Image (cartoon, rainbow, N blue to C red):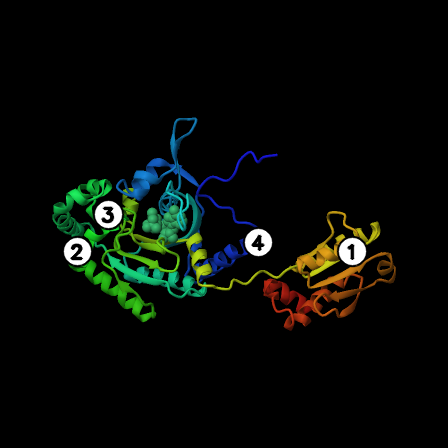
Amino acid sequence: MALITKKIKGTEDVLPKQSYRWQFVENIMREESRAYGFRELRTPVFEHTELFARGVGQTTDVVQKEMYTFDTKGGESVTLRPEGTAGAARAVLEHALENEGLPIKTSYFVSCYRYEKPQAGRLREFHQFGIEEYGTQSPVADAEIICLAQSVLDRLGLSDVHLELNSIGCPACRAKYNQALRDYFTPYREQLCTTCLSRLEKNPMRLLDCKSPEDHKIAEGAPKITDYLCEECEAHFAQVQKYLDSAGVTYTINPTIVRGLDYYTKTVFEFVTDCIGAQGTVCGGGRYDGLIEELGGKHLPSLGFAMGMERLLMVMDAQGVDIPQPAPCALYIAAMGDAAKIKAFSLLKEVREMGIPAETDVVGRGLRAQMKYADKLGARFSMVLGDNEIAEKKIKVKNMESGAQTELPLDDSFAEKFAGLVLETDADFGEWEDIPPEAINEILKKI
Ligand code: ATP
Ligand code: MG
């Protein structure tokens, strides 16, 4: 029979044999977020369209071309989130989180939806890990989030990803700069792409971000924002750099980075690599002091970044980073006969309760087929449970790699003794860090 449908273009499945890679990356992000004092915020996958129109900005590619927007049966316009910042800001405002004290430090994992041309590193559904910090103007905060991003990338084992830093100033310095850009680009009007032509009036800085090679070339000679920063923005930028220097974070100043979203002010940054082709930005972020006001709140300076999960995983692949696979099944219990199957099931529960992965037959295989399956699973130990073992209250546990057999009592102490066996053989089978440390402590206390 033919399949009735397949996945939608630009979306991807993460299969069970791949998901450990995602979990490895996500765990590091969770640990680093915690170390830096950020707590997770979860927001809905869809929001009222005007949130993104205002929050992301009317002149952005995202709002102009890329949003999945539709009317509900009730006639409301809703949009699948194209990014995580606007929803987070909405939630912070709606729940008045500023009353709980400043700064507010949140992290998120989101799926995002953008109607873009699917290609390597560019999907229609993709995933981001991000950080949002609200209620601080201080350059320490800028440096803090950049350090966090750097720590995540370091812990993922990535080299060859470099930090590019810029400041795009505040509305005051930007007014002058925008005029300088208009003056620069106007003589090239005929050569600019149509999107850039409309940007020239509304938001000329966006021209620096154009993907068209011709426009990119023209943009190379454009005036640099760093020459137009007001005193305060310049001082802020200098401070950010000082803090980064003190933390040993290296960067290049790149005055052409403007970021894709409208709400940025002052600091903007990207972590970029050359190793996965054209879509080499794995993390983008900066400061957006005007965003909360744009959404109807009081002035609450904020900043953050987002990392593209798929792109990060691509970089890890390209750089041959070895992601540790979770330990396979520790114990396979092959059971013969009805009584043994029932007994196996209760033993299994006790072993699993210690956090040790264990399996038995759930499809009705014969003994030989069960043993073959244990091998296929990569079980570290196996045992054959039949009427004899039940009668004698002891059982032989076989180390599948060395073939060595150890006899264990088949009573209430079985699970603990088996855990002891696992720990004893740790040196040979070194992947047991997957057992949570609390469980290991419990086991060690008992044996
Ligand atoms: P780009 O310049 O690559 O289009 P962007 O400026 O649109 O990126 P952001 O909105 O800042 O990207 O999103 C943050 C990160 O999310 C990007 O750096 C990238 O890693 C990832 N990302 C953005 N769009 C996509 C996509 N369509 N598919 C996969 N990852 C994406
Ligand atoms: Mg984009």
The residue carrying pointer 3 sits among few (fewer than 14), some (14 to 19) or many (20 or more) residues within 10 Å by Cα, namely: many
Q: Nearer the viewer, residue 146 or 182?
A: 182
Please give the label number shown on residue 221: 2
User: In this image, 125 relative to 243: left or right?
Assistant: right
The three-letter code of the residue at mark 3 reads: Arg
174 lies above or below 144: above
Residue under the image location 52 percent in, 57 percent down: 21
The three-letter code of the residue at mark 2 reads: Gly
Find disc 4 in the rendering and name its residue: 17
Indicate which disc, 4 or 3, sits on the residue closer to the N terminus. 4
186 lies above or below 324: above
Residue under the image location 86 percent in, 56 percent down: 387
Quadrant holding the C terminus: bottom right
* Element at label 1: helix
The three-letter code of the residue at mark 4 reads: Lys
Quadrant holding the N terminus: top right
The residue carrying pointer 1 sits among few (fewer than 14), some (14 to 19) or many (20 or more) residues within 10 Å by Cα, namely: few
Estimate the spatial distance between the alpha carbons at disc 4 and disc 3, rounded to whole Å: 41 Å
* Element at label 4: loop
Please give the label number shown on residue 206: 3
User: In this image, 324 relative to 123: left or right?
Assistant: right
Viewer-nearest of labels 4 and 1?
Answer: 1
The percent coordinates of residue 262 (x first, y second) are: 27, 46
Please give the label number shown on residue 368: 1
